[in-house]
Amino acid sequence: MCGIAGFICAHGQRPEPDLLDRLAERLAHRGPDDRGRYIAGPVGLVQTRLSIIGLDSGHQPLLSPDGQHALVANGEVYNYIELNATLRDLGYPPHTGSDSETILNAYAAHGLAALPQLRGMYAFALHDVQRGELLLGRDRLGIKPLFYIRLADRIAFASEIKALLAILPHSPQLVPSAVRQFLQQQFASGEDTVLDGIQRVPPGTVLRINAELQIRPHRYWSALAVAPRQLGIEAAAAELDARLDDALREHQRADVPFGLFLSGGLDSAVLAAKLAEQGAGRIKSYSVGYRGTRLATELAAAARVAAHFGFDHQPLELDGAQVFGRLPHTIWCADELMRDYACLPTSILAETASADLKVVFSGEGGDEVFAGYGRYRPPLAERLLKSLLHPGSGGFRTHGQWSGYWTRRLFGPALRAVAATERAPFQRAWRETPPHWSAMQRRQYTDLVTALPDNLLVKTDRLLMGFGLEGRVPLLDHRIVEFGLALPDALKVRQQQGKWLMRRWAEPKLPPGHLAQPKRGFHVPVSEWLRGPLAADIGQRLLRHPGLRDWFEIAAIPELVTACQSGRGGVRELFGLMQFAIWHRLFIEQLGVQPAPDERVLDWLG
């Protein structure tokens, strides 16, 4: 797990070492153990390393023996042992203990045809000296991030946006459609980010960039290739067990100890069951709950699972002040505008776990892969009505998260002008799906290519890497994703309950009654905390915030505060304004400022 960055220059220029070092400095939190730099011709690469596999021999950049290839990589190639055995027979033996070297050797042996052989989570930059190309690649599901920008004389890339801002020759400009998507959908999705010119390398894709800075994308994997299957219950359960077994065995490959985030729900409990079955032993596990709130806690459920499997469990019970104090640091970590309240407790979990570990497992992806969300199984009448009123996505993800009232009252002219783009990523994804897929499969796919890489996995990568902690997500092994997406709907949902097959597989392995509890999700009681004097203080500061005036009708903020204080809604809207204001300060007004993990939020609103 690491931070990677660099650029390819045009017009015969050579990369400037000081600019490369500036990129690396902004990624130091992702790799506190080591740092390396490479310059050859027009290409410069840097890496900051978090040592997980090949502790003493995995320094990067990695170079091929003939000097024709150089690599920096972030993440893990879990099947490196099997691939190395094959590559050794082809004359490409590994010279280090690093799993990342497998990318280098596999490319030398097979070119781009090597990519489908890789199993893992990764982002990489590879300099092919002979071809004069820089390759930027990303894993199938977008678990690991990679961004790039075209400048006047080069194309630069980095694991995080904040690194690219360090070399931007001008003040960054915001993209109105992406800002509106953040406000209404909780995140902006697609290749464009909220900052003009900075783009995401798409998941499952390699960008080939030549000396003229021409970019040729090569997509090596897509969930669209998954064909629906007809499977019986017993055959499906056996295949699920086999795929989980393979994925968890490979994900445990590390030269450092690992732990587990236990939510109290099904997905992390499935990981716990399989890890225990495979002899992981008394690993550390962590869960989170809240004091002084009406929100139901899952601490007891998580503790039962941990005790059942003999884990060394640490529950965290948090209060509002602890959680809110995380907001500036989580915004800095995430880079991108995304309103996921779960970022706040995730940050505290990450900091706690990083005191003992470098690797932690998490259950992200189970709902998307096995159709756990209620939004995948709406009543037919609801689906038809929404599809009629809001066409383009089969009635899926049709409403923004801001109320219509506050959208009209608070959105400024620039945001009102791009209303038509609000649902564009979901409509685009829906149109891509094969017509023979069921509506449930199409909904799963839409989330797999929008909400998963651009929201959920941002939290999993960036919030953990903010404390030098690697998050592993075995349920997003692409073999499990393909299996889950291909399952018949009847094995995903029964009696209006999602993830039916996974529940059937897990029930005999978990504590009695564990699956009888309702699905809660990773909720945070923000609406209870964002009231009273705190809401008033936030409102006063937002009224004076210079970044809000260009985008919002700030005269409506006092009315919004009153609504929050009286329990008449407006919490998402006020939180979104507050988050935008802090993000604007960190990424537009005062580049390079880094909040501490615990801050007084009001101080960051001006």
Image (spheres, rainbow, N blue to C red):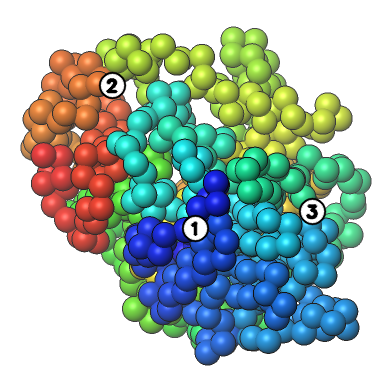
Between the C-alphas of marks 3 and 2, the distance is 44 Å
Q: Nearer the viewer, mark 2 or mark 1?
A: 1
Disc 2 and disc 1 in contact, CB within 8 angstroms? no
Q: Residue at x 24, y 61 (%)?
A: 597
* Kind of residue indicated by mark 2: Trp
Mark carried by residue 424: none
Q: Amino acid at mark 1?
A: Arg
Residue for badge 3: 483
- Along the horizontal axis of the image, is 308 left or right of 444? left
**Residue 558 or residue 89, whichever sits in front:** 89
> What secondary structure is found at the residue carrying circle 3?
helix
Q: Are marks 3 and 2 in contact (CB under 8 Å)?
A: no
Q: Which residue is mark 1?
A: 14
Dot 1 alpha-carbon crowd within 10 angstroms: few under 14, some 14 to 19, many 20 or more: some
Q: Residues within 10 Å of mark 3 (few under 14, many from 20)?
A: some
Residue at label 2?
A: 551
